[in-house]
Image (tube, helix red, strand yellow):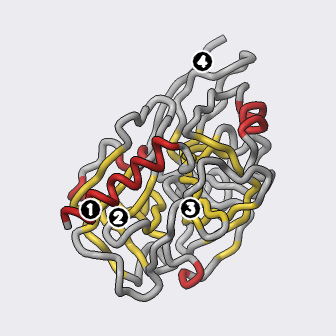
Amino acid sequence: MLRWSFWIIIGAAAVWPVLSQEAGKNDSKPLPSGRIVGGNEVSIANFPYQLSLQIEGTHICGASVVAPRWALTAGHCCFGVNLADLTLRGGSANHKEGGVLFALDKLVIHPDYDDDNLNFDVCMMRIEASFLGYANISILPITNSGSIPSDMQGTVSGWGSTVSDGEVVSNLRATSVKILSPTTCTRQTRKYVTTTASMFCAGNVGRSICVGDSGSPLVFEQRQIGIVSFIITECGGTAPAVYTRISNKSVREFIQQQISNGVRHS
């Protein structure tokens, strides 16, 4: 049977399309796409850590404030982009207006990031000034645990579309998603992809991420535990979405190291 393989940046959670009729794994790369499905519009006052990563004023990915000068997003959101074209908008539920625009002066992608399978899909972004001192902008601490809270509900937010073939939305949305155990994640995704130790799964039928949400945070008990990475078949479908697992030792240490470097050299 013919297999198709392609990789297209369309604005934010990646999509791994199932194009082969053969049983077993498909050889396609994940596609950056992503949106909030089954959620509701929310106030930025309740999600003050949420940022919009933009290229020349156009929203491409979500991000989160994790330190006074540092934001966190997915590696595929930073891969191959020109730093000078990027800005972050914070303090506004509308990614098109309001709040504050921040210029970036540094991007650091995880050294083991793999653009083929999105392993270690994480990027740190440093701004020229500081996030502190602005209305509706505050730091979201990352998890300090080495494990994920299996079978619990987390909260994911972003500006992705609300239907599979839709456009990104103007106003921030959020929804709750079930966090799957590593065993359940492997069982539900192995037909399509090979998940790694830097990944975990979350989502319910009708409640998940899709086009425009890549890089956005998944939060559990007021700490960020995941970064929106990719979807496998359809947004809000039976296959769960895949997130970068911040509780992974290499991911967590990478984030902490960048923050520490920024403190020493600011």
Read off the residue under disc 4: 3
Q: Amino acid at mark 3?
A: Gln
10 Å neighbourhood of mark 2: few (<14), some, or many (≥20)?
Answer: many
In contact (CB < 8 Å): disc 1 and disc 2: yes
Q: Amino acid at mark 1?
A: Gly
In primary-sequence order, the first of circles 4 and 1 is: 4
* Residue drawn where x is 39% and y is 47% of the image: 254
Q: Quadrant of the N terminus?
A: top right
* Residue drawn where x is 47% and y is 34% of the image: 7
In contact (CB < 8 Å): disc 4 and disc 1: no
Picture quadrant where residue 167 is located: bottom right
Report helix, strand or loop for mark 2: strand
10 Å neighbourhood of mark 1: few (<14), some, or many (≥20)?
Answer: some
* Residue drawn where x is 66% and y is 51% of the image: 164
As measured in the structure, the alpha-carbon distance from the residue carrying label 3 to the one carrying label 1 is 20 Å
Read off the residue under disc 3: 224
Q: Amino acid at mark 4?
A: Arg
Picture quadrant where residue 21 is located: top right
Read off the residue under disc 2: 70
Disc on res. 262: 1
Foreground tag (4 vs 3): 3
Disc on res. 181: none
Do we see residue 252 in this rendering?
A: yes
Left or right: residue 65 versus residue 111 is right
Report helix, strand or loop for mark 1: helix
In primary-sequence order, the first of circles 2 and 3 is: 2
User: In the displayed structure, would residue 103 be above or below residue 236?
Assistant: below
Can you give x and y, in whole percent of width and height, for residue 197 in the image?
A: 58, 35
